Amino acid sequence: MLATPGALPPAAQDARWAYETKQDGQRAVVYLAGDGSAVLRARSGTDITAAYPELAGLGTALGATPAVLDGEVLALDADGRADFQLLQSRMGLAHAPERAARRAAAAPVHLALFDVLHLAGRPLLGEPYRRRRALLESLELAGPHWSTPGALVGHGERALRATREHALEGLVCKRLDSVYEPGVRSRAWIKIRHMRGVDVVVGGWQPGKGRLTGLPGSLLVGQFDGAGRLRYIGNVGTGWSEAERAELAALLAEYAAGTGPFDPVPPLTGVHWVLPQLVGEVRYSTRTRSGLLRQPSWLRLRQDIAPEDSAALLPEVAG
C-alpha cells in the first residue's frame, strides 16, 4: 500500500488519523514462515534478503508464529537519521552475499516496522489500521537491527512540526479506519515531505524526448562556492508546463555556449551548455553527501538575482 502526496487532514478530523515519521529508505515486506527464516521483498517483488544479512535474526523473533510485516530498511547516520545515500551502497548487493556481509559488519541497516498484514495464518488486510497497529505493537518486535517506531494518534500539527525541527524527511498520515490495499496509492495514507528551497545557476540543459523533443527535458544547475567556482549540484527535470518549457528554451538559446561553466564539468552526454546567467529557485528534499540535490523540482526564474548573488557556502560540495 502506498501513500498519496498531500497535506495534513482538516483539524476537525485530526483525531481520526495516526501520524508516523516518513522514513527515507527502501520499502520491504518481510515474510516470517515460523521456521526461523525471514524473507524480504522490495516493492517490485524482488527478493532482497541477501542484501541485508543482519536482519536474518528477525526470523526467530516470533518463534513458530508466521507473519507478514511491512516496513522500511534504513541506513542511519551518526545522528540517527536515515541517510539514503548510505543505504544505496547496500541496495544492490542481493546477488553479492559476501560483499553484503562485509558491508553489514561495517555499516548495519535498521528495519523500521509499521504494519502487520498476516499473523498466525490469519490475513489482516481487511482489518482497520487501528487494529493492525495494536497487533503489531503487541508483538514487541525490538531487536539489534529492527524496531517498531511509535505512531501518534491526533496532534498532526505537532507531529509535522517535530519532524521538521528534527530535520526528518516528513510525515505519513494514516486514517485509523483504513484497510490495507496492496499495490494501491491510497488517499487513506497521505505523505507530507519537507522540501527545501535553494537558488541555483543554470549551466546547461539536456533535450527532452517524445512530445518534449526540441525542448529542455532537464536543466543542469549549480551553485558558486566560496572560491567563485560554479559547482554542479544536479539535474532538474520537473516543475514546468510545456508553454513554460518553450519560454525557457528561448532564453537558453540566448545564452548558448561552447563549453560547460561547471568546475569540474560533470561527465554527462548530450548536454547543451549555456553561459551561467540564468538563476532559478528549486525545491528539493535533501542533499547527498557530495552535495547533489535529491528530488529537485523547478519553482521559478529569479530575474531579481544576479548569478554571483546566488553564491552559497557549500562545504558538502567542496572537493
Image: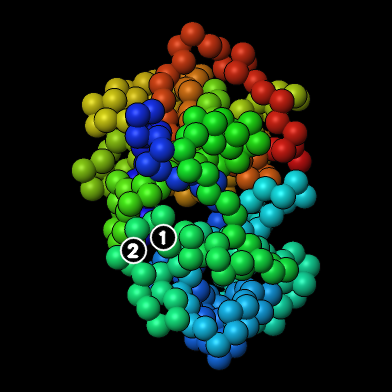
**In the image, residue 242 lies at what x, y percent?**
24, 32
Residue at image coords 30%, 46%:
187
**In the image, residue 200 lies at what x, y percent?**
54, 26
Residue 51 appears in view = yes
Amino acid type, callout 1: Arg
Q: In this view, does 187 lie above or below 91?
A: above
Q: Is residue 158 above or below residue 138?
A: above
In the visual, does 116 lie left or right of 187? right
**In the image, residue 159 lies at what x, y percent?**
54, 36
Q: Which residue is at the front of the view, 238 or 103?
A: 103
User: Residue 158 is drawn in which quadrant?
Assistant: top right
- Residues at marks 1 and 2, CA–CA distance in whole angstroms: 6 Å
Picture quarter with the C terminus: top right
Amino acid type, callout 2: Glu
Q: Which residue is at the front of the view, 11 or 220?
A: 11
Q: Which residue is at the front of the view, 92 or 224?
A: 92
Residue at the extreme top of the image, as rendered: 304
**In the image, residue 298 lies at what x, y percent?**
42, 30
Mark 1 lies on residue: 131
Pointer 1 with pointer 2, Cβ within 8 A:
yes
Residue at image coords 64%, 51%:
82
Residue at image coords 50%, 74%:
30
Mark 2 lies on residue: 127
Q: How many numbered markers are drawn?
A: 2
Render colour scheme: rainbow
- What secondary structure is found at the residue carrying circle 1? helix
Dot 2 surroundings within 10 Å: few (below 14), some, or many (20 or more)?
some
Q: In this view, does 213 lie above or below 225?
A: below
Residue at image coords 63%, 31%:
165
- What secondary structure is found at the residue carrying circle 2? loop
User: Residue 234 is drawn in which quadrant?
Assistant: top right
Dot 1 surroundings within 10 Å: few (below 14), some, or many (20 or more)?
some
